[in-house]
Image (cartoon, rainbow, N blue to C red):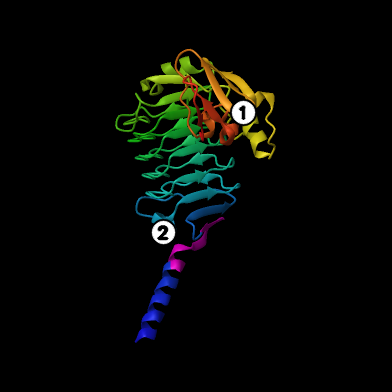
Amino acid sequence: MRLKTILAVAISSIIAISSFAQSGTIDNLSWNLDDNGTLTISGAGAMKDYKLLSSPPWSSAKESIRKVVIEEGVTTIGSYTFYKCSAMSSVSIPNTVKSIGSSAFYECTSLKSVSIPGSVTEIGKDVFFKCSGLTTLSLGESIQKIGGGLLFNCDKLEYLICSNPTPPEISTKLMNETFAAAPVTACTVLVPEGSQAAYKAAKGWKSFSKFDKISSTTPAQNNTSPAVAVATTGSNAPTSEERSGTDENISWKINDKNELYISGSGKMKRYAPDNHLRPPWYSRKSQLRYKSPYRRVYDMPC
């Protein structure tokens, strides 16, 4: 009896593992969901579009998907591809993708930051519908058209970054507006220098209350800033560019003791961990200490 119980437990464990790790092919693309919850999609060509009642083959395990990696060669993200993958916290989109279908990331509530590359020209409707955890969305410089309901109920969104100098065309149709139920008063729209006036006057875009420019400390889309590049090469000797600088109304300097001094007047710019919003001293963050006006020095993990 005991042996039967042990065998039953072992068999059920094997079934559970096999149901978690899955793989297969869809037309010209391959997919693999590993034991860590990473879904990788590879191949060449367009991803299939799905509908509400026709699901992708990984949908039975969608609650196990933690991360999505779309490899170079895939040219589209299909409609409803990651519908209600609520545990997915990150997605990597390559420069080969040209369009994103409707409801692709519908109710992916664990997504926090998404960067859409410069190769994408069109985004369908309801792509980030009810992505309630999303704080930063970056749109590449080639975006020309955006469907309705893009940020519906994305209440935590702090930054919408659009690298196209010309405001992309959006939907203003009744009940299908691109920025319907978007946090237009709380979210800051970051656009290229010289483009703020155009965005403030553009249909739909002008509903936002706060605009700012993509500053010199904002890395270009899909590129690494010089400071980050130095940090990732393994060099411990900081360059003079990493040691001091200015960012809008503040000046900053790192001394030989790795103490960070910040001076100036007015409010400090709001930063965030996303590539587009990191402070200029970010590459030295692990060594920094903060010098306060009260002459006490604190460790500063950033």
Report the residue marked by disc 2.
61
Q: Nearer the viewer, residue 6 or 239?
A: 239
Q: Amino acid at mark 1?
A: Lys
Left or right relative to 19: residue 241 = right
Q: Is residue 12 above or below residue 177?
A: below
Is residue 30 highlighted in magenta?
A: yes
Position of residue 53 measured from the top left corner of the image (x, y, whole percent): 35, 54
Position of residue 104 measured from the top left corner of the image (x, y, whole percent): 43, 44
Position of residue 150 measured from the top left corner of the image (x, y, whole percent): 39, 35
Is residue 47 highlighted in magenta?
A: no
Q: In the structure shown, which secondary structural element does the residue marked by tag 2 occupy? A: helix
Left or right relative to 62: residue 280 = right
Q: Amino acid at mark 2?
A: Ala
Q: Nearer the viewer, residue 252 or 189?
A: 252
Q: Give me the C-alpha separation between circle 1 and circle 2.
A: 50 Å
Report the residue marked by disc 1.
257
- Res 202 seen here: no
Position of residue 57 measured from the top left corner of the image (x, y, whole percent): 44, 59
Q: Is residue 252 above or below residue 45?
A: above
**Residue furthest toward the bottom?**
1
Residue at 52% over, 58% down: 32
Where on the picture, by quarter, is residue 230? top right
Going from N to C along the chain, the mark reached first, 1 or 2, is 2
- Res 199 seen here: yes
**Residue furthest toward the front?**
295
Question: If the image is split into quadrants, where does the N terminus sit?
Answer: bottom left
Residue at 64% over, 24% down: 243
Residue range corresponding to the magenta coloring: 17-33
